[in-house]
Image (cartoon, coloured by chain):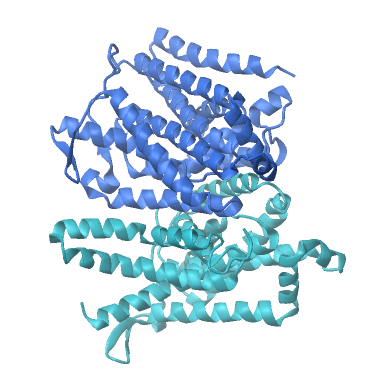
Chain colours: A cyan, B blue
Amino acid sequence: MSTLLIIEQLLNGVQFGVMLFLMAAGLTLIFGVMGLINLAHGSLYMIGAFAAAAVAGATGSFGLALAAALAVAAIAGALIEMTVIRRLYGKAHLDQVLATFALILIFSEGTRWLFGSFPLFLDIPDALSGPVTLPGGIQYPLYRLFLIAVGLLVGLGLWALIERTRVGIQIRAGENDREMIAALGVDIRRLYTLIFAIGAALAGLAGALVGAIQSVQVGMGEPVLILAFVVIVIGGIGSIKGAFIGALLVGLTDTLGGIFLPELFKLFMEPGAATQTGSALASMAIYILMSLVLVWRPTGLFGARA
Amino acid sequence: MIPERLVNWVALLGLLAVPLWAVVVDEPFTITLVTRAVILAIAAVGLNIALGIGGLVSLGHAVFFGIGGYAMGILAYHAQTFTSLNLIGLVIPGTKSMPVIWLVAIVISALAAWIIGLLSLRTSGVYFIMITLAFGQMFFYFAISWSAYGGEDGLSIYVRNGFPGLNTLVPIQFFGLCLVLLCVVLFLNARLQNAPFGLALNAARQVPTRVETVGLNPVRLKLVAFVISGAITGLAGALFADLNRFVSPTMFSWQLSGELIVLIIIGGVGRLYGPVIGACLFVALEHWLGGLTEFWHVYLGLILLAIVLFARGGIIGLLTGKEGAHV
């Protein structure tokens, strides 16, 4: 096991974590402000990826594809907020789960009807393809570095939006006391639609960015959604900082576990059995991490409320 | 408005009449369809104990369904290959006997429910939903990577397991067995609901602080409910695997967990026969809409949205004018 491989896997883990952060940030923001659990967040991820693949196929431009992913996901988010989600605020969690589960069914089958069951492919643009040589002689795909950079920039932008702008003040106020900011004359309905659209746009962006290294297909959103849930359970629901730390923890645990656990078991088992046990355990690693965090801190690392 | 008791009897008689009619006109596929509904109903009755009485929105009940399925799959696989199961020095022979398989499925899923419940019940509300969903996914990926028992491809069992005195290969006999189990489970549920435990659990869902002040531990009540619930769903999993003579990781999938909740909400949350009516309607819709259009999930989604937004009590609520339990 060389240092080069370890650094490469660390970077992979960070890249995966940063993409999870884009999903988890929207989820945790929506829960923090509106108190809503949104299962359909994975559908917005899928919508972003399909919009990007369709636009890239028609125009050949990756930049336009990303813009389309952001715009289409944001519009879809705003639309479902105004038609369905709005009726769910203040309702029981069971109703929210069921209604957003219904939205998943509708979006998944709708997408299958529009695009068919076969996966689409989104190509990495020429300017971002190929490996680069990092200090220390490590060859690493440029596109994955680009993903890390985009994720970090978006994280920074989100932080600036929430901490430094007027809308951010309203969002933070909304987390603490909805009635009060409505009484102070903030149009709370518009604020909610805006927050939902921001969360949706982030999910759509993540879908488009990841779509270029995986295939774009129906059902791609839900595994990521569940991982994003693990992230915010670890980080603490409602906390953007928690989502960031949690996402990196999950990304690194998953990536490194898949590589190192089988190796670890080879130290005291025969190779075949070690690979099998190791990879089976690796697939469970992040859930074990989640359980440990829960035993230690039931409200997550940065969670304030239960 | 129709009395709830009448609705329940009609549902039960319908479940008996349709397969008998299918025997007369020789439509074995209809019997299989109704058997499927009965087995899903058993699973949903199990979930309804945690969800409807205990207020635990578990989005990971497929875990127990899958455990039941794999209990059947693994035992029958060892029996059909004449090998035995080595569990850290413990040698367990395979079996093709349903009662033994059911017992194993119930015990192991109860154990899993105890561990998952112990961890998940440290939290509540939306955390609980996400955590149960995550545990479901954990089992799903574990089953996929567990290549000794088929991994992603699953396990096929060539001959349906046996029950003393019955020929389970005859569809109507296997159906009868499942229906009897459904009745047993419903009877247990009804008894439980009116027993001191059920009343305390119901109170723990509504006002946990009051339950605590009279000296009961609401978390313990919920944990016991979760274990009972998991055990029943596990039994249904073993039956489901026997119906299809096949187990695969999809029995652990999060969609299945979601569908089990959907069954309950269609029928009516916290109503004794809610899961039964929900399961029958779900299987009927699946068969009928699925035959009309490939994209029947769109319609299922729309129906579900309408029920959540406008008809909270589900079908039983619509017929009897009673509201569903508030969860």
Quadrant containing the N terminus of chain B is top right
Q: On the image, which quarter does residue A177 sit in?
A: bottom right
* Above or below: residue A52 compared with residue A91: below
B269 left or right of B260 in image:
right
A288 left or right of B299 in image:
left
Q: Could you say which is closer to the camera, residue B152 or residue A214? A: B152
Q: Could you say which is closer to the camera, residue A130 or residue B105? A: B105
Where residue A213 sits in the image (x, y, percent)?
38, 69
Where residue A99 sits in the image (x, y, percent)?
62, 46
* Above or below: residue A110 compared with residue A67: above
Residue found at x 86% / y 69%: A184
Where residue B254 sits in the image (x, y, percent)?
46, 47
- Tell me if I can see residue B213 in this picture: yes
Quadrant containing the C terminus of chain B is top right
Q: Could you say which is closer to the camera, residue B24 or residue B97? A: B97
Residue found at x 21% / y 67%: A263
Residue found at x 61% / y 51%: B125
Q: How many marks?
A: 0
Where residue B246 sits in the image (x, y, percent)?
30, 34
Q: Which residue occupies the extreme bottom position in the image?
A: A135
Residue found at x 38% / y 30%: B240
* Above or below: residue B129 compared with residue B31: below
